[in-house]
Amino acid sequence: ITSTSVGYGDFYATTHFGRTVSGVVTFLGIAFVSLLTAALTNALQLNGEENKAFLIAEREKAKLRLPEKAATYLQLWYKTVTRRPLDGLNVLNIRREFFETLAAARLDIEECNSRDGQVNVILSRARRTKVLASTMVLNMERLRWQDYESELQGEELNSMMNQEVEKQLSRQHANINTHVHGDLKTEIAWTRDKLLKIKAAEKSGNVDGTHWRRDRNMVMREGVRLEWIICGMAMCGLLCSLINNELVFQDVDPANSSLMDAVKALTTVTSLGAVALLVRYYQLRILIQRIDVHNGFSVGEDLNETVSILDVLSTREFWFETAVILTHLPPACTFEFVFVDMNRPVGIRAETMFALLCTSRIYLGWRLLREHVLKDIPKKTVISKYCGIKMGNTFALKMVLSGFSSVQYIVISWVFFVLIFAYQYRSVEITSCLLASSTSNYCHTGLNVDYSMAHDENTTHFWSALWFIIVTTATVGYGDQTPRTQLGRLCAAGAAIVGTFYAALLASSLSNALAWTTKENAAVLLIRRQYFRDKLRERAVTMIEMFVRRKKKEMDEARAAAQGGAPSARETHRDDKIKLRAQKSDFAYTKQQACRDFDECVDANGKIKLIFYDAILLEKAMDNIQKIIPHVTFTHRPQLPSSTVTPTSQDDYGSASHRHASWSRLELRDIEDEGDEDKDGKRRVEKKKPDSETVSSKQRERRRSVEEAGLPANLLFAATNGERR
């Protein structure tokens, strides 16, 4: 209790050593809460794959909402054009929602990556673009520095670029993807066989899409329906157990009450019905697993739709849930368990004991909440397979505890657990020895027993127990109420631990929800830039004023010196220089912040996104260049330099090959030229040199100027350092 910082005051340290131990335990408890908060903050964040699945799901939701938003926006546009009354339509919200939905629906799959995923995409695209550009430049340089007339066909250059990309990138990823993809040829052969099986199954009619057992979505809907029925029947049995417990507290004899036997019989019926439906539910779960395996690895083969009872009995989760649901008190069965607790006998009736055990059925409510969270995700199975995650309990929990809606879920679940702990605390604090239905002789053995606890209203009234649990979970502990039994202390300790956990959970959820988003951070940086732009004018005015004052002071000093007056003190000049230096540094910093570009007014995630888009555009540009290259012929024709520039000696400027100024010309081939067709039916384009008459006058003048001017041999030799590169 001390480690949870509750402190009822029923026990306290009476020695200095005990106080030291209490202080250390309190410090450790606070440290544990801090570590728990940090751990939950990291655990509740979506990883890369989960974030990608979440963004793809949001994109699919936006696609479903887009027609409705577009219709509303079209209605607004029509009323605006026809100048009709808007009838209370919020124009700004309609426009904002439409364009946000449109932007979300237009997202590409690669744009749905997380931060690490976008960095990986940027790296792969940059590597490919680098290899393409370096290969093209290298071949062009080789062509340029040749001493004789030569040509390079675009098809040849394009094939060399593709071969270099395949060679270098496969070398870079050889050690990374070996354990993931294995042999590429084996993978291709396996994919080809699977496609052939699909086609064969479609032709033979083995794939029956109308049967609901083969449709995964229909099987999942049937499973969700069974979850609701099982949860309802289990909660009905729990309610019957609580009714029996309350009848015992009202001094009703369980051995002679037909009403309690009827309620027990209803509990048995609902429990057995829930278990029978549970068997059916696990059969559907196993069938879904078989469908997933069939769709992934054995498409075209027969699907085993029959799930036997033995398959269900081999599942450990089924036995656990069966034990939880079947835990109840059957009809015509009652007993009393009496034990000594704190030197006094404490009795618990069987109805109370099984009512407390039946409260464990509340875990079935989590299934309903999980399905409620995941039901709005379209194409859930496809997204989970594409991202390589399982949309189960962990993903649903992170979805629940993300955003400001997590506060609502946390508060509701906290109230739920407070009610459960309050009922359990009230039940264990009441002893059956003082009830009229008590049949144990051990309760009246003449021991010196203090029965005042049983007659205290605080231990028999539910609202008093609820107040005690609320104070305990809030880690306050006023001390007005304290547990009188060991089971009561156990409930109080559990409530204190749950309260500490919920405090850490609330702090971690709020820290994640209150974090700046990319758009909010960009808005803050733009506001800061505008603030510095306003300050820049003030700093500029101050600098001008100081400059004018300094010049005026220098003129006054010069005039005084010319008239024979005394010069001013050096301290004044030193102070002015220091102030001017400070104003200059302040002005420079303000100018730097005010002149920031719009792309710089984003956080790290925004900058990565901008680089991601730039990498996509750069790769598209290289792809367009590759599309043009096959229709281009690169021709190199070395020309002698002008006669006015002649080296005096061969040793100074190099050989004759170095004295040649080189230039290259791009010759475009018309792909629509008439040519013969080869045996494959493809048009073979004849290689034709462009006619000199088709060259424009500007091109002829530019060529003549290059030939006349050329490149001086001495400058060429100096630029290349006497080497060919």
Image (spheres, rainbow, N blue to C red):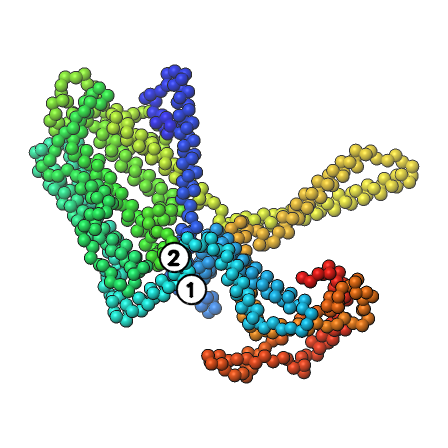
- Point 38% across, 28% down: residue: 3
* Residue 395 left/right relative to 228: right
Residue 415 quadrant: top left
**Eyeballing the image, is 273 above or below 185?**
above
- Judge whether residue 150 can be spotted in this image: yes
Task: Locate the N terminus by quadrant.
Answer: top left
* Residue 566 left/right relative to 487: right
Q: Nearer the viewer, residue 160 or 559?
A: 160
> Is the C-beta separation of discs 2 and 1 under 8 Å?
no
* Residue 305 left/right relative to 181: left
Q: Amino acid at mark 2?
A: Tyr
Label 1 packing within 10 angstroms: few (<14), some (14-19), many (20+): some
Which disc number belongs to residue 310? Answer: none
- Point 45% across, 56% down: residue: 112
Residue 350 quadrant: top left
Which disc number belongs to residue 70? Answer: 1
- Point 25% across, 28% down: residue: 487
- Judge whether residue 232 can be spotted in this image: no
Q: Nearer the viewer, residue 77 or 387?
A: 387
How far separated are the C-alphas under marks 2 and 1? 29 Å
**Measured from the top left, where is residue 222 in percent x and y?**
24, 56
Q: Nearer the viewer, residue 307 or 284?
A: 307
Between label 2 and label 1, give the one nearer the viewer. 2
Label 2 packing within 10 angstroms: few (<14), some (14-19), many (20+): few
Which disc number belongs to residue 386? Answer: 2
In what element is the residue under mark 2?
helix
In what element is the residue under mark 1?
helix
Return the disc, 2 or 1, that comes first in the chain's sequence: 1
Q: Amino acid at mark 1?
A: Ala
* Residue 133 left/right relative to 584: left
